[in-house]
Each structure stands twice: as structure tokens, then as C-alpha cells.
Image: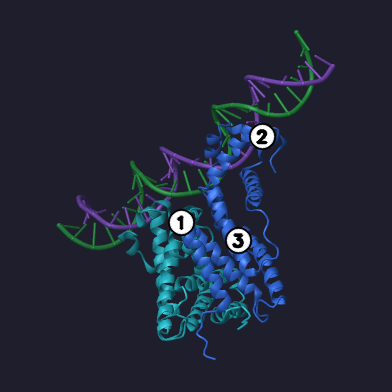
Chain colours: A blue, B cyan, C green, D purple
DNA sequence: ATTACATATGAGAAGCATCTCATATGAGAA
DNA sequence: TTCTCATATGAGATGCTTCTCATATGTAAT
């Protein structure tokens, strides 16, 4: 947690520090990111940094927290009645929106997720839980086969849309097309029915 | 490429260096791995290291190369006539075999792949190409719906089995069960058919 | 004006990294 | 034996990092 001294700073100075940190943490992963660069870019003296934050991790967690707040505001609430399949598409669209409005958040997110496997695990688990709930609900609604392993479905699609975004998300049309393709495959399967 | 001096070394000494490097590179990613640790563990003097290798990367590439050779020998050849679905299962079994026989290779592989996104991209592309070929062949065999996007299928399953292994591969039965579940879903889809 | 206190400042301590280089060693050839 | 040359060796050069601390500054209260 940043110290009081940090919160007492002018908005302008806080923003300078935030921007410098986002810039650095979206370019290099946590362990490679250099406080040197950050204090230089933020134009604050070395000593001041430690008046504001306990250490590098303190700053990092603050940044992640702020970004998370900002992202929720940008994406807005999901439609709670959307089917699992619709939810996937909505989520992909939300990801694209963030990527467009705050590309640096996307880069930082990608670095965070590949850097800290424990963090990634938590993120995966949390997302998975949400998806599983929606799948279970749709099973009750009679929209999804009840014998299916919800965990597997959730992971297949979540990991797919995540990876596909990292590696082709810059091409929005293509990305949405691929996600829709994946949803179709989930829905219908790929085997030729011989019955 | 290691220097001649390295190849002239006794097998015992080469193995000592190999083992020390695998140990370090399977514990910390490339940029965090410490040559200090490696020369200490391998019991070679600092100066000698630079008689054998040009730099850290030189050693690293050598290790990856050796591991790759060793792994191919362990897994052996795939059955070329197996269906796409069977190939997936075989691949998962191969991964488990490596994880059992050379757990340190798996750890090193995981670190490499998350460390170097360019390397990961290459790996993904190469694997994807192979899967796509098999899928296309099975389309011609009349086993897979021809209108399906092969690229999406390949990625969905490949990324799934990869991630699932990283996060639950230690429980072999569970892992194979999940992979089989994923294959079933791919085959049949998850939507309740209303026709 | 004086005191008190929060904040600002940057030089440098301390630690760790990779890599170099001058010198030592030891085995085979002349 | 003496010379040659590949190899061995480790101290330390150099450069990066995070983080500390003694001192300066500015602001508000007395």
C-alpha cells in the first residue's frame, strides 16, 4: 500500500508517477522493470520514491489495482441473462475495447500474466469459476448437455480467447471471427455424425 | 554454439555443466538465471566458463538443443495413421511420460515458453501447423466436418492440453480424463440438439 | 521570529550480475 | 630440457540494480 505521502501529492504528480510506472511495467515484466527508469520518467528524485512507496512491489500492486478499476469502468456490466455462448462473445468484445482504448493495459496484463504464474493461476481460477456458474445455469435452462464437464468447457474457451487475443487481437475482425468459430465448434462439435 | 574447448572436455565434466545448467534454467527463467550459480554447482572456475561458451545465451541454446534431442528419443515417433482425436490423446500421454521421466525438462520448458514470447509464438505456430495438417487429412477422410476452421480447432485443443498440463499435470489420471473430456466436446459439441 | 514537522533530495551503500584478462599450469614436440 | 600452445584460473572491472540516510527545504502553528 502506498504511503500517505503519496496520496497527499497533487493529482498531476500522482498521474506522472502512474503513467511512468504503467509505461515501464507494460514494457518489461516485474523483475526486469527498472525503478531507475520510472523515477527518471516521472521526474521525481530517488529518495522521494521511498517516501511514497515501500518498494517496487508496492508500486506495482498499486498500479494493477488502479488499472483494474479503470478497466471495469470501461467494460461496464455484463448482461446477466446472456447465454454462455453470448457471454463469450461479449467478453471478447470487451477485451477488444480495452485493447483499443488502453493498449498499454493489455501489454501490462499480458506481461503480468506470463510473469507471475501464481497470479495467473488465481486469475484463471477466478475466471473459470464465473464461466462454470454460467455453464451450470445454462445446463438447467436446457441449453447445454448436462453430462458435459463444465470445467473443461470453461477452460477450453477461456484459454483460447485469451491466447488468440494475445497473438492476433490487433486484427479485430479476424479475432471476433475466430472467437465465433470457436463458439460454433463448442456448440456443435466437429465430428461428422454417422447416426 | 559452445566452443571446441567445451566439446574437448571429458564426458563427466560436460555432464556436470549440463546438469548444473538444467537445474538453474529449470528453476529461474533465462534473465533471472545466474551464471554464478551454474559455475558454482558445476564446480568450474569463472574464467573457464568463457573458455567453453561465448555467453549465457550460448549455454542456454546448447541446453535447449540437448533437451530437445533427449525428449524426441524418449517420446519416439507418433503413429502417422492415428486420427486427429487419437493423436491428441497420444500427445498428452507423451507429455506425461516426459514429465515423469524428466520433470526438470518440463519445468525448463514451461519457463522458456512463458519467458520468451517470440519462442512461444514459434512453438505454437509449428505445433499448430502439424495439427492443422492432421485435421485437413481427417476432413478428406470424412471424419471431420469440412466447413470447420481447422486453425481454431487446432488452437483450442493444443492450448488447452498445454495449459491443463502446466496446472494439473501432476495428477496423471485427472489430466488424461480432462483431455479426453475436451476431445469428446470437440467431437460432439455441447449444445443440446433441438432438431 | 521561532519552533515543529512533513516532505524533498540525491549521493552513495550494498549487493548482485556478466564478462575480461593477466598469469599459471601441464602435456606433447623438438 | 626447452619450447609451444591449449587450457585453467580467479581477482576484479564494469555496470546494473534496489534502497538508505543525512541533510535541505517549505509550510503552518505558536
Which label sits in the foreground, 3 or 2?
A: 3
Q: Looking at the image, is D27 positioned above or below residue A85?
A: above
**Rendered position, B98 above or below A52:** below
Give the CA separation, mark 3 to mark 2: 40 Å
Judge the density around disc 2: few (<14), some (14-19), many (≥20) Cα neighbours within 10 Å: some
Question: Distance from label 2 to label 1 (Cα)?
Answer: 39 Å
User: Which chain is home to disc 3?
Assistant: A
Residue B149 image position (x, y, % from top left): 46, 73
Residue corresponding to mark 1: B39
Describe residue A123's horizontal placement relative to residue B47 as left or right.
right
Per the image, the residue denoted by label 3 is: A91
Circle 1 packing at 10 Å, graded few (<14), some (14-19), many (20+), is some
In the depicted view, which residue is nearer to us: C18 or D7?
C18
Q: Is mark 3 on a helix, strand or loop?
A: helix
Q: Which residue lies furthest to the bottom in this view?
A: A195
According to the image, label 2 marks what residue?
A51
Amino acid at each position: 500500500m502506498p504511503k500517505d505521502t503519496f496520496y497527499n501529492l497533487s493529482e498531476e504528480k500522482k498521474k506522472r508517477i502512474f503513467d511512468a510506472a504503467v509505461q515501464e511495467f507494460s514494457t518489461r515484466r516485474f523483475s526486469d522493470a527498472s525503478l531507475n527508469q520510472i523515477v527518471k520518467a516521472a521526474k521525481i528524485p530517488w529518495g522521494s520514491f521511498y517516501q511514497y512507496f515501500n518498494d517496487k512491489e508496492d508500486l506495482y500492486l498499486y498500479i494493477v489495482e488502479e488499472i483494474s478499476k479503470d478497466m471495469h469502468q470501461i467494460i461496464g456490466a455484463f448482461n446477466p441473462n446472456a447465454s454462455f455462448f453470448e457471454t463469450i462473445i461479449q467478453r471478447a468484445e470487451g477485451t477488444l475495447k480495452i485493447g483499443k482504448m488502453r493498449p498499454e493495459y493489455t501489454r501490462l496484463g499480458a506481461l503480468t500474466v506470463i510473469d507471475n504464474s501464481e497470479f495467473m493461476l488465481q486469475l484463471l481460477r477466478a475466471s473459470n469459476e464465473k464461466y462454470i456458474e454460467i455453464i451450470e445455469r445454462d445446463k438447467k435452462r436446457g441449453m447445454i448437455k448436462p453430462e458435459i464437464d463444465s470445467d473443461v468447457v470453461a477452460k477450453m474457451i477461456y484459454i483460447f480467447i485469451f491466447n488468440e487475443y494475445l497473438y492476433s487481437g490487433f486484427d479485430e475482425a479476424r479475432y471476433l471471427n475466430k472467437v465465433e468459430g470457436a463458439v460454433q465448434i463448442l456448440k456443435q462439435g466437429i465430428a461428422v455424425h454417422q447416426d
